[in-house]
Image: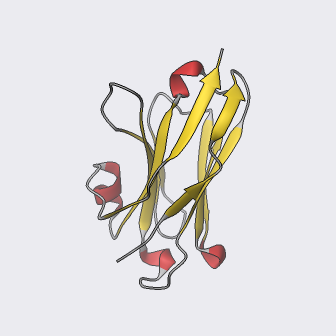
Amino acid sequence: QVQLVESGGGLAQAGGSLRLSCAKPRRTIAFNILAMGWFRQAPGKEREFVAGIGGSGGSKDYADSVKGRFTISRDNARNTMYLQMDSLKPEDTAVYYCAADRTITGVVGGKADYWGQGTQVTVSS
């Protein structure tokens, strides 16, 4: 079992920034073999892919809606993944979830094996 713990959510104004973190505190599976990603779900909407990153951090993918504004990264020495969110918009308001899987395909396709509990991001206009 892989436990994922998100943090860093909160309230921001439009145009502002927030940084989310996703930590894997237990050493059940080596962190650097896991592809990871971020998803979000707004009220009344389906969960959607936001960004994904390969185990080494070399490959990254973003949803069109966040390209140029969000940056995904990871620090394998700290077993932590990040999502830097800049130029926030009210439509970015959602619960953000981190996900992990042995393949980037699994993450990007929303079929990751492991999920965090989510952290709320609210952007005011």
The answer to whether residue 86 shows anywhere in this view is: no
Residue found at x 53% / y 28% = 93
- Note whether 117 is above or below 114 in the view shown: above
Residue found at x 44% / y 36% = 63
Q: Viewed as shown, does residue 21 lie left or right of 113?
A: right
- The spot of residue 89 in percent (x, y) is 60, 22
Q: Viewed as shown, does residue 75 lie left or right of 36?
A: right
- Note whether 33 is above or below 36 in the view shown: below
Quarter holding residue 115: bottom left
Quarter of the picture containing the C terminus is top right
- The spot of residue 5 in percent (x, y) is 52, 63
- The spot of residue 92 in percent (x, y) is 53, 28
| Count of labels in the image | 0
The answer to whether residue 44 shows anywhere in this view is: yes
- Note whether 103 is above or below 32 in the view shown: above
Residue found at x 53% / y 32% = 66
Identify the residue at the far top of this view: 125
Q: Camera-side residue: 51 or 125?
A: 125
- The spot of residue 47 in percent (x, y) is 34, 38
Residue found at x 72% / y 23% = 15
